[in-house]
Image (cartoon, rainbow, N blue to C red):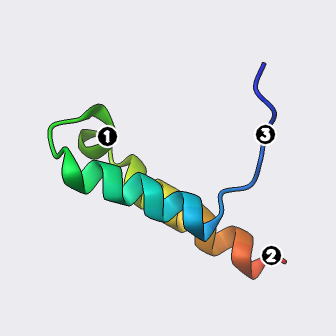
Amino acid sequence: MAKKRPMTPEAARRIQSAADRKPNSKTAKTGFKQRAQRAADRNRKNK
């Protein structure tokens, strides 16, 4: 089982960039890039 780590702004940017490069990918189509950004914002506020 993978170790859970909080979403960082850097990780969210990598996810968004990958989704933007490949708009037909699963990441782009499922809205994961938006969820990643929200999680990064939430984690930044909670620090």
Q: Quadrant of residue 44?
A: bottom right
Q: Which residue corresponds to mark 3?
A: 4
* Label 1 CA crowd tier, 10 Å (few <14, some 14–19, many 20+): few
Asked if marks 2 and 3 touch (Cβ < 8 Å), the reply is: no
Secondary element under disc 3, as helix, strand or loop, is loop
The CA distance from mark 1 to mark 2 is 26 Å
Q: Which residue corresponds to mark 1?
A: 30
Q: How many marks?
A: 3
**Type of amino acid under label 3:** Lys
Left or right: residue 25 compared with residue 36: left
Q: Earlier in the sequence, mark 2 or mark 3?
A: 3
Counting from the top left corner in percent of width and height, residue 38 is at 53, 66
Q: Which residue corresponds to mark 2?
A: 46
**Type of amino acid under label 1:** Thr
Q: Give the camera-side residue of 14 and 5.
A: 14
Q: Earlier in the sequence, mark 1 or mark 2?
A: 1
Secondary element under disc 2, as helix, strand or loop, is loop
